[in-house]
Amino acid sequence: MKHTPNNSRCGKDLAAPSSPDEFCNLTEQKAGLLGKYSEATHEINSALDEEDFSKVPVGIKKRREVIKRVNILDKKIEQAMFVLRMDCLSEKDQERVEESIKHIEEIVSLLIADEQKCLSRVRARYDAAKSGILDMQEKRKMSRGYRFNNGPRAARFVDSQVG
């Protein structure tokens, strides 16, 4: 693509994705990655259901890897949005770009709901474990408080010699 005055007016840059097709491909890749993120979240939820806590760190690791890849794509998408000017696109291309953005927004809204569900379950599990530990500590303190010490007794006021 030659650099012409018309291309510079529309903000086209050779280094960044300059066509709506490239932008839509990037958003499709992001949608696929967000699907993998959703799968990892569902794995964590099912592990919490089954109380198989060894699977939770595996799901968290998968999610972290996906997040790293999504962040890289986000930078590319941001560059593409900076380069693509909607007023320079045809109506068909504008609709495609807007649909791809709406698709990502829908996926993110579904992910937020799944994420909140997962966080509430983990929070409930944490609170239950914390209250269980506190109950055990109270029982231990109570049992120690009423335990008799069979060792040598300390001198009391009545037992001390007056003299």
Image (spheres, rainbow, N blue to C red):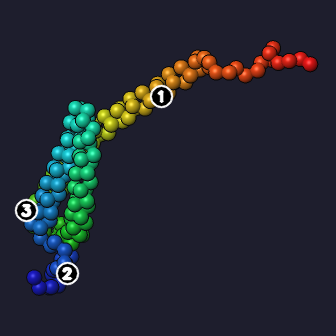
The quarter of the displayed image where residue 23 is located = bottom left
The answer to whether 38 is drawn above or below residue 91 in the figure is above
Q: Which residue is mark 3?
A: 92
At label 3, the amino acid type is: Lys
Residue drawn at the location 89% of the way across and 17% of the way down: 162
Labels 1 and 3: the sequence-earlier one: 3
Q: Which residue is mark 1?
A: 134
Q: Percent x, y for residue 62?
A: 22, 51
The residue closer to the viewer here, 130 or 121, is 130
Q: Which residue is mark 2?
A: 8
Residue drawn at the location 70% of the way across and 20% of the way down: 153
Q: Are marks 1 and 3 in contact (CB under 8 Å)?
A: no
Identify the secondary structure beneath mark 2.
Answer: helix
Specify whether 98 is left or right of 119: left
The quarter of the displayed image where residue 91 is located = bottom left
Q: Percent x, y for residue 19?
A: 12, 70
Q: Percent x, y for residue 65?
A: 23, 56
Specify whether 24 is left or right of 115: left
Q: Quadrant of the C terminus?
A: top right
Cα distance in 3D space between marks 1 and 3: 63 Å
At label 2, the amino acid type is: Ser
Cα distance in 3D space between marks 2 and 3: 22 Å
